Image: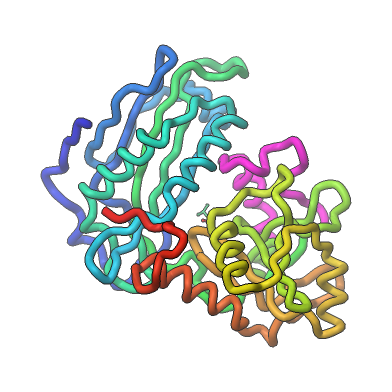
Amino acid sequence: MEIIKTYRSRRDQVNFESLGFGEVFSDHMLTMEYKDGRWGSPQIVPYGKIEIYPSICSLHYGQIVFEGLKAFYTQKGAINIFRPEKYHERMNLSCRRLCIPELSLALFMEGLKELITVDKEWAPRKRGYSLYIRPFIFATDSFLGVKVSETYRYMIITSPVGAYYKEGINPVKLITPVEYIRAAKGGLGAAKTPANYAATLLPAEEAKKKGFTQVLWLDGVERKYIEEVGTMNIFFLINEELITPPLEGTILGGVTRDTTIHLAKEWKINVTERRVSIDEVLLASKKGSLAEVFGTGTAAVISPVGEIQYGGERIIINKGRIGSLSQRLYDEITGIQYGERPDNFRWCYLI
Ligand code: COI
């Protein structure tokens, strides 16, 4: 792999003691072209502007996929990339839905390993902080007809990050919009593609204006079953059953969702992937059997939900405080990520 290093690192301009999310970018980035039916060879170059034609089809029609994973500076000084194979699997799933050529696991891993090694000093040392890794692929044909592109560009950029929500691990407040949906069956909901996030911007802005942190998404057909929260998967602890909506095409298969399911099962918790309606949650809340609600995602890890507004009803969960299962999951997942707890499932890729 060709590596062209920057002659001047920007690292000393960054305050690693107070990082937001995705605001600063490491010194280097990886780039690789697809043409004539195959991926070329990757290159690592200084992070900076890229040159593209204004006519490239992805700018107009959104033929793009992306991923988001994290690397952690562990206790022993190694860098741990958490579950990279699982993110690779999801990226290829998104590629198939968006008619984008897939990437082999070997190429994906080689790119990650080389880029993180070059910029390993950008992995924050502070607990709660990490190096967020953003691989993405966009179509580059210069053509305004709506069709599948024949050329693409794969890139990886990385960003030292702190908490995703300003609340950190403190519970967030959600509202369920009646007039918007995130995805419908047969659509793009299960793919990690920008259109899904674009669809959430207006509802999220309206929610924020009303004093809520994020939106709780209901299904696109009956507007009854809960699907996701903001950009995360969601879990409910009702009567000692840990419920999360099933992956039936409208929901993104979160890696943290999968991690949570594995850990909860290991802890002998009754985990079910089944449909859960907002009415069931409301009823459970009234009966006092709704113990916890939390979102799972790579960026925030575990994000407890303290309140849900649905129509005229207000559901307060666990008195607006973080629940013990949410806390236990957060501690265990981050413990494994920082190399403080045993990696029983072999999720850690150390470099
Ligand atoms: C996540 O990692 O939970 C997300 O989906 C957020 C990301 C798009 C910044």
Task: Judge from the rendering whether residue 258 lies leftward or rightward of residue 287; answer left or right.
Answer: left
The percent coordinates of residue 140 (x first, y second) are: 45, 23
Query: Residue visible at 38% across and 38% down?
Result: 108
The percent coordinates of residue 122 (x first, y second) are: 25, 57
Query: Residue visible at 57% across and 19% down?
Result: 148
Q: Relative to the observer, which residue lies in front, 173 or 279? A: 279
Query: Residue visible at 24% across and 36% down?
Result: 44
The percent coordinates of residue 302 (x first, y second) are: 55, 69
Image quadrant where residue 268 sits: bottom right
Residue 13 is a magenta residue: no
User: Would you place residue 155 above or below residue 53 in this image?
Assistant: below
Residue 348, visible in the rendered structure: yes
Task: Judge from the rendering whether residue 109 lies leftward or rightward of residue 291; answer left or right.
Answer: left
Image quadrant where residue 260 sits: bottom right
Query: Residue visible at 59% across and 73% down?
Result: 267
Residue 204 is a magenta residue: yes
Residue range (magenta)? 178-206
The percent coordinates of residue 204 (x first, y second) are: 65, 58
